[in-house]
Image (cartoon, grey):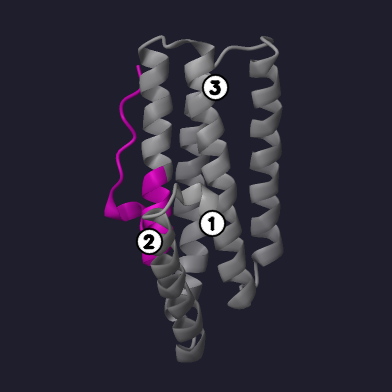
Amino acid sequence: MQKEFVWSDEYSVGIDEIDAQHKTLFKLINRLHKAILDKEGSKTCGAVLDELVDYTRIHFTLEQTLMRIGNYPEYKAHCEMHRALVAEVESLQKKIASGQVAISFELLHFLRNWLTKHILGEDKKYGNFFKEGDHQRQKHVLGWTEHSQESIEQHRKKRKWWQFW
């Protein structure tokens, strides 16, 4: 049986907002894990999966925006990885909604492995690119994430975070 998906500094890319979003993805995957363990049914599991997919899209948008404004050389390839994951999960969502397949530990295992490999491999690359880059790039990208975080916090007080984006 799979255990809870635990965040550690090993997963940090060195950009606070991205790390905070990755932690949220861990929490959402853990909620899906708990829903499956508790046999809460496909409706509840489907709702958690839907929330995870929605959050992932927002997270990918932020990452891709940072890569674009920071002139990250592997931007297009990274975007393609994001697109492929979203397409695969959307296909699974349709199968789940139609009753063709149940939400299972296999899906959970897939999501956990993909996220782990993606963060430790691909996301660490752009984190290092921004940390090791010239001072102007660091200031521009990291300053943008701080401003973005302030805006998000202001809107969180008024409504749920995903309604802001």
Which residue is under mark 3?
A: 46
Tag 2: amino acid: Glu
Question: What span is colored magenta in the figure?
Answer: 1-24
Which numbered disc flags the more N-terminal residue, 2 or 1?
1
Identified at 69% across, 18% down, the residue is 95
Which numbered disc flags the more N-terminal residue, 2 or 3?
3
Identified at 66% across, 49% down, the residue is 81
Which of the two discs, 2 and 3, sits closer to the camera? 2
Identified at 70% across, 23% down, the residue is 94
Q: Is residue 82 left or right of residue 150?
A: right
Tag 1: amino acid: Glu
Task: Tell me if residue 101 is in the magenta stretch.
Answer: no
Element at badge 1? helix
Q: Which numbered marker is on residue 153?
A: 2
Q: Which numbered marker is on residue 109?
A: none
Q: Quadrant of the C terminus?
A: bottom right
Task: Tell me if residue 3 is in the magenta stretch.
Answer: yes
